[in-house]
Amino acid sequence: MELPVNQFKKMLLGGHQQIGLWCTLSSPYGVELLAGSGFEWLLLDTEHSPSDVTNVLAQLQTVAPYPVSAVVRPAWNDPVLIKRYLDIGAQTLLIPYVQNAEEARRAVQSITYPGGGMRGVSALTRASRFGRVPNYAQTCRDELCLLVQIETLEALDNIEAIAAVEGVDGIFIGPGDLAASMGHLGEPGNAAVVARIEEAIRRIVKCGKPAGILTGDEAFAQRCISLGTRFTAVGVDVGLLARSTSQLRQRFGGAKA
């Protein structure tokens, strides 16, 4: 049995644009609906959702037949959490709140087996097809993709150092927390925040790393793509559902806010 090819990583390193959607509903049924929408990747979020390892396992199983890549965001840069998501078959992880090169190296070590890292070893996991993939431990790293999320002023100051860490495959900008770090809580569209985001994209690209972002502002998403983002999330499932249902009700008059 062959190790599955990580299409997200293949496209990312090939320089192709991939448009994604944030998934926070924590439902296999919901994520299957989204898997057929044509996005190249779906972010399965466990940082700001009620989801956990068991939910993510079901979601990974659900989207597997569809031509879309699943990216999992653990709740923290925690080697125990990271190990569990890798063991259930996640091939691409987005690690939140990475602020410096040392934290980036810790993430790399968490996805790497001993000899270069600290990932715990189990021969019988879903990731290895329950032991059926020959030499999984020796070959899996080729198909694992590590994205780190920068979302503070400290992280912005350390972009070049983070990008230089071997094993980091892409750098993602988190506008919401970055805005808060800059004193503009709840204002990711603030002009000062936007300027720092645009500068960050340019710096990441200059370092030779793929840059990513999440924004529900379609015009700004296009702007980020023009600056060089290569994995660009353009919406959140909960937000899309909330807005569309509210708008539907309002078209029939008398709706309360």
Image (tube, rainbow, N blue to C red):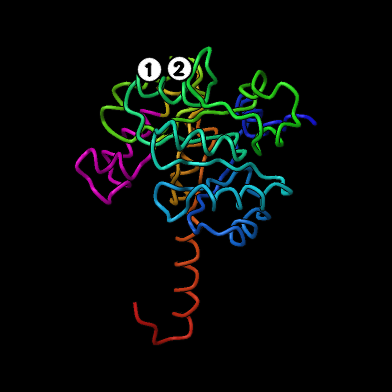
**N-terminal label among 2 and 1:** 1
Residue 155: % across, % down: 31, 27
Label 2 secondary element: loop
Q: Nearer the viewer, residue 86 or 198?
A: 86
150 sits to left or right of 132:
left
Amino acid of disc 1:
Glu
Q: Is residue 79 left or right of residue 151?
A: right
Residue 172 sits in quarter: top left
Tell me the residue that label 1 is attached to. 160
- Report the disc number at residue 207: 2
Please tell me whether residue 191 belongs to the stretch shown in magenta: yes
Q: Residues within 10 Å of mark 1 (few under 14, many from 20)?
A: some
Q: Is residue 168 above or below residue 69?
A: above
65 versus 1 height, above or below: below
The residue tagged with tag 1: helix, strand or loop?
Answer: helix
In the foreground, 2 or 215: 2
Image point (40%, 42%), residue name: 75
Task: Tell whether label 1 touches label 2 (CB within 8 Å).
Answer: yes
Tell me the amino acid under the disc marked 2.
Answer: Cys
Estimate how packed mark 2 is, as few (under 14), some (14 to 19) or many (20 or more) residues with alpha carbons within 10 Å: some
Residue that lies at the very extreme toward the left in this rendered image: 183
- Location of the C terminus by quadrant is bottom left
Please determine whether, in this image, residue 143 is positioned above or below residue 66: above
In 3D space, how far apart are the residues under numbered discs 2 and 1 (Cα atoms)?
Answer: 7 Å
Estimate the x, y position of residue 63 in percent, counting from the top left.
66, 50
Where does the image place residue 237, in percent across and percent down from the top left?
51, 58
Name the quarter where the N terminus is drawn: top right
**Residue at (36% x, 24% y) in the render:** 103
Image point 36% across, 22% down: which residue? Answer: 159
Q: Which residues are magenta?
A: 174-200
